[in-house]
Amino acid sequence: MSQVPELGESNPGVVAAVPASLPSLATVAGLVLFNQVFNVGATTGFALSGRADSTGLFLLWQAVGSAFGLGAQVTFAGLVRFLSLRVANAIGIGLAFVSAQIFGAFVFFHEPFAPVQWIGTALVFAGILLIALGG
């Protein structure tokens, strides 16, 4: 019978995050960029499915959102390979929230943003970064 290791014990088959070195910085930057593109694509696809006026369009946009969502999950897994989980979460959740607000809501859907909403978006991201990076 297999036992689940306690926190702090080694997990067979699970490797620690690889420290970012000069060659991997480009990889991390690429993963961050693609993660944001995939997150915005997923959010936009699912939003378009919610606004669809037919079952066919609803299913199409669900499929598009799901494909982008898979890309977001794969790039997130790549980020965790090179960064700590909390930093990857700050990027995959915090930065994705900001990207979805700016590109999804503001750019693609032309939703108006009051200055206080821009400030709130920045504060949400800053708060998530403080949680992720705070020691």
Image: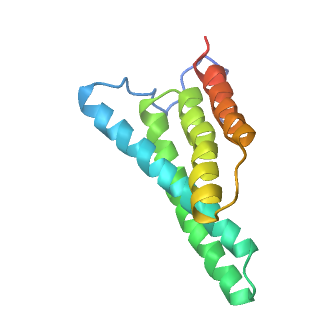
Residue 105 seen: yes
- Give the colouring mode of the picture: rainbow
User: Residue 53 appears in which quarter of the rendering?
Assistant: bottom right
Q: Quadrant of the C terminus?
A: top right
Residue 5 seen: no
Q: Nearer the viewer, residue 36 or 62?
A: 36
Can you say whether 99 is above or below 65 in the image?
Answer: above
Q: Residue at x 67, y 67 (%)?
A: 46
Q: Quadrant of the N terminus?
A: top right
Q: Nearer the viewer, residue 49 or 31?
A: 49
- Residue located farthest toward the front when viewing the structure as drawn: 115
Q: Where residue 130 sits in the image (x, y, percent)? A: 63, 20
- Residue located farthest toward the left when viewing the structure as drawn: 23
Q: Where residue 81 sits in the image (x, y, percent)? A: 44, 35
Q: Where residue 38 sits in the image (x, y, percent)? A: 51, 56
Q: Residue at x 25, y 26 (%)?
A: 22
